[in-house]
Image (cartoon, rainbow, N blue to C red):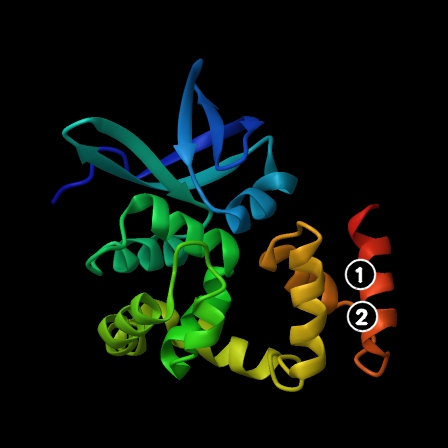
Amino acid sequence: MNKLIDFIKGKIEYIGEDYLVVENNSIGYKVYTSAYTTSDLNGKADSAVVYTQMIVREDDIRLCGFSSRAELKVFDLLRTVKGVGTKVALGILSSIAYTELVNVLITGDVNSLTRAPGIGKKTAQRIILELKDKVNKAEEFKTLEAVNLETNIGFMNDENNEAIEALLALGYSIVEAQKVLKKIDTNLSIEEKIKQALRLLVR
């Protein structure tokens, strides 16, 4: 299907809980998106590029968009899975950064996928079953996969997972938790990691 709007380039006028408004030629486009994209575009508010997909249903027409074509590709793939609509796909991408989600799908990490809202074990298994090979073969993710596997070595362990769970319980997203923990000394205790993470997050 041909795309009516491939991307929008303009100023970020407003960032909501699950959407942002991009101004282009005096028109404000409301674009539903992920926590990863809102965080990524926060520092590029004056000149942002949002790659979009228009979702048309009988009772609703909306634009969804992301700061990279790779994240848009993951979003489109998620929506091909039965039972995973637009809202669920965005929920997954807001709970797990798409850069991490690619590895979750490739490695078959069911537990990480069930952290997303509304995703039980059976749904997570179905998503992985249907998308693992597609993600593995997609050229868009070849470099991304290699970079992630390298940067995640020594990071995703029991202690960091426990620290992430603590930050999630305090209301932070998994994107925020993963980003901040990667800035903290891996040799610290769990309690000290959480304390330092909170100091960085409230700045």
Point 23% across, 28% down: residue: 60
Above or below: residue 56 compared with residue 77: above
Alpha carbon distance from label 1 to label 2: 7 Å
Amino acid type, callout 2 = Ile
Q: Position of residue 181 (x, y in %)?
A: 73, 67
Q: Position of residue 197 (x, y in %)?
A: 80, 61
The quarter of the image holding the C terminus is top right
Q: Are marks 1 and 2 in contact (CB under 8 Å)?
A: yes
Amino acid type, callout 1 = Ala
The residue carrying mark 2 is 184
Above or below: residue 37 compared with residue 155: above
Q: Position of residue 59 (x, y in %)?
A: 19, 26
Q: Position of residue 153 (x, y in %)?
A: 62, 85
Point 82% across, 56% down: residue: 198
Q: Secondary structure at mark 1?
A: helix
Q: Which circle's residue, 1 or 2, is located before the other in the chain? A: 2
Q: Secondary structure at mark 2?
A: loop
Is label 1 or label 2 in front?
Answer: 1
Q: Which mark is residue 197?
A: 1
Residue 161 vs residue 96: left or right?
Answer: right
How crowded is the residue under tag 1: few (<14 C-alpha within 10 Å), some, or many (20+)? Answer: many
